[in-house]
Structure formats: C-alpha cells, structure tokens
Amino acid sequence: MGILLQGGYVVDPVQGTVQIADVLIEGNVISRIGHALSTTGHAVRDLRDLYVLPGLIDVHVHLREPGFTNKETIETGTHAAAAGGFSRVCSMPNTSPVTDDPEIVRYIVTEAKRHGYATVHPIAAVTKGSKGEQVTNFRALHDAGAVAFSDDGRGVQSAAMMKEALLQAKTLCVPIAVHAEDELLSGHGVMHEGDVSRALGVQGIPTEAESVMIARDLLLAKATGAHVHICHVSPETAVHAIREAKRQGIHVTAEVAPHHLLLTDQAVKTLGAHAKVNPPLRSEADRTACVQGFLDGTLDIIATDHAPHTQEEKAQTIDKASNGFVGLEISFPLLYTTFVQSGLLTLAQLVMRMSSLPAQLFNLPGGRLQEGGQADLTVIDPYTTRVVNPRLFHSKGRATPFHGKSLVGWPLITYHAGHLVHDIF
Ligand code: DOR
C-alpha cells in the first residue's frame, strides 16, 4: 500500500514549472507522478490548493553533537529541519570534539539515520581542532561521509594553510565552505561597525574583516582551480568581489542567510543579543547588495546558518552573549513571504535556490521530485498566516530576531525517505 498525494501543485525547480499532479509514494521512493492516478489500495491525502516541493536542502546548520547537547542534538536539530521542510542538511564541524576525525563523521551520519527526520551530510574540519595549524586527513574524512570542509565559526587565518586545503579538496572534487574572517580585524567586535555600534558604544566588526578574506580566497581559488564556497556573505564589497570572480570564471559559489537579506544592524537596537550573529547584521547598503546579489544569482543559494544556543547564553548582554540564532523552522516562510508573495521570485525559483541548487553545489542527491527518486518532499500552505512562535520550535534553540513576525508559506507536511516526519495539516 502506498501513499497517494492527490491534486497538489507540484513544483519542479529544475524545469521551473508548477503543475497539478498526483504523487505516489511506495516504500521510500516516489513510484509515480501523474494525473488521476488510481487510488486503489493506497492511503489518499487530498492536497488541493497546496504546493508539493522536493525536500529542502540546507548546506549550513549547526547540530552541536557531539559535545554541546545542551544547545541542540542531532535528534532535535533534524526534527527542526523536518518541521521547516528540510530533508537534507549539512552539519558544521564546530562540535566538541571538532568533527576532524572519520569516527565523528560516521557517528553523525548514523545518529541522524537512527532518528530518521532528515539526512545529515557532515562537513568536516579543514584543520585539526579548527585551530588553523594542521590540515586534516581529507580523504579519510571524505570516505567516512564528509561532503565538504570548513572551519566554520572561525576563519582559516593562514593563506598557506587555505591553499593546501584547496589543493586537497580539488582532488576530491568537493568544496571548501569558507567562513571568511580575519580575526585581527574583527578583534573583540560584537556587532557591525557603523553608526549603530557607535551610538550603542560597543565594539564593531568592520566589513573588511570579512571581505579581505573573501578576496584572498577568491585569489586562491583562481590559483588552484578548486571550488570555494563562501558562507553567509554579508558585506556589499564581498558581493561585488564574488560577482567579478564569477565573471572571470573562478570556481566560486556563495550562500546568503535569510537574516542578512531581511535585517540590518538597526535590529540590535531593539533586540540586543537576539540579533547578535557572526558575520553580523550589517548596514542597509550591505543588505540591499545582498538582496541584489541573491536575485541576480551572484549569491547562489540560501543557507540558514541555524545556530542554536541555550536561553541563558542568549540572555546575556551583547558583549557576552553567543553568536547566532536558529533558522531551520522559519526560513522557508520568511523567504516565501519576502520574495515570492511580493513577486520578486517565482516559487520554482525560490525552491531551486533552496533544494536543487544546494544539492548540485555540494554533490548531494535530491532537490527534485522524480519517479524512482527518494521520497523527500514538503507540502507548503501558501495562504495561512502564522506568527513566528519560538515556543513551538522543535529545536532546543529559541532565540530568533523574527519572533512575532507574521508569515505565510509554512510547511504543513514533510516526508523523508517515504516516512511522515512532520504533519500539522
Ligand atoms: O553566528 C554564528 N554562530 N556564526 C558562526 O560562525 C558560528 C555560529 C555558531 O556555531 O554558533
């Protein structure tokens, strides 16, 4: 007996089409997509007026395990992913111990499988302990399941180390996901350096702390021919540099986080540490450049940088609080409301930037609904307005600068490998 998802608008992000169709799930695969499929012997769900998408894919999340289970676990983080419509996520290696050992990579993959909410593709550390001193064993980590390398949370400070890492990554045909930050330039900054930081009297992080490292890594990508993927781009100068590098044919891709598209450093005035993130929320000119870069494809994909912390860690003053906030459970409605409802992007275009393109850039399966493919899919309600309520999150993290925002485009149902993992329909 299968599950027949009947009469929804089925979105194909690769073809750019939206068509009414039935989708039949049998076991863990999509066995048929077609019109007026026979209902005999199947459980039927009527999805009229709803959108059926391939499961979303997020290449930048922090699941905190092993080590920081007070902030998040693989179970709670993947549950949050399912609730946000994500079927695959890439986990960042700033765990404890750092994900620099094949055993840890295997643990993360297996633990995610055990819970079954979403597939986790670990990103392993570029350097041992992410200390920037010694490049890890890329081949062994890749063999264990790592799909990319990053010291996210910190920048790789040495250009020589980064060059060595890029050469290793190139032999494996995988990207280095760059957290671009010159630690001496960012110093003890706690928010974007600008009028707001000066008015609040707190130390700022200048845009150059990020953009000089991006410029360096674009040059190294050119020199090595390796794939550099720039994480959470925030300054206008970086958007211009990436656009120019692409024009020159350098193998660079980039992600932008929803908060850098929607918020500026002004949010720190009202939200304090709940708007503290690294890279920080920047100026209106930076935000506008990110939006432009996202719309013209310079910034290829959306990644949430889901970064859960405990309530105590976020309740501190801005200089002491941890960087980051959660994003998995609200990013699709945030972007649907901002870009699709307003007509800036079609639904298929947004879905491409949140499923098929991330899959392509990180060599992952998925990102498309097709017969014979794994049944990872998400059903979206384009009509009902709901308010962001962190008390309803499955993540252990509760901090979000979007608390109380009214949004449409919420995921109602998620199937992962044919299993129902989220259902609020
Ligand atoms: O805000 C952030 N939080 N930025 C990072 O680079 C790391 C992340 C975290 O791990 O909490």
Image (cartoon, grey):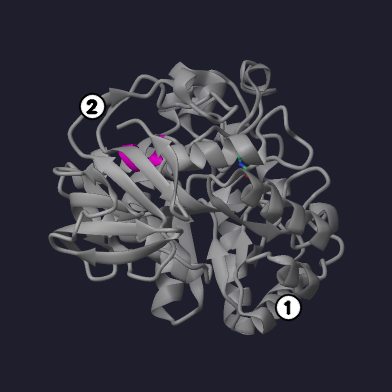
Q: Above or below — where is 151 with respect to 143? A: above
Residue 167 % position (x, y): 71, 80
- Looking at the magenta stretch, what is its main secondary structure? helix
What is the number of the mark on residue 385?
2
Which kind of residue does numbered mark 1 sit on? Gln
Q: Is residue 405 visible?
A: yes
The quadrant of the image that shows the C terminus is top left
Q: Above or below — where is 350 with respect to 248? A: above
Residue 252 % position (x, y): 50, 71
Label 2 Cα neighbours within 10 Å, binned few <14 / some 14-19 / many ≥20 = some
Which kind of residue does numbered mark 2 sit on? Thr
Q: Is residue 205 visible?
A: no
* Ligand 1 within 8 Å, label 2 CB: no
What is the number of the mark on residue 168?
1
Residue 14 % position (x, y): 29, 69
Q: Mark 2: which secondary structure?
A: loop
The CA span between labels 1 and 2 is 47 Å
**Boundaries of the magenta span:** 330-334
Residue 101 location, quadrant: bottom right
Q: Above or below — where is 84 with respect to 217? A: above
Q: Give the mark toward the camera: 1 or 2.
A: 2
Residue 400 % position (x, y): 48, 27
Q: Mark 1: which secondary structure?
A: helix
What is the number of the mark on residue 419?
none
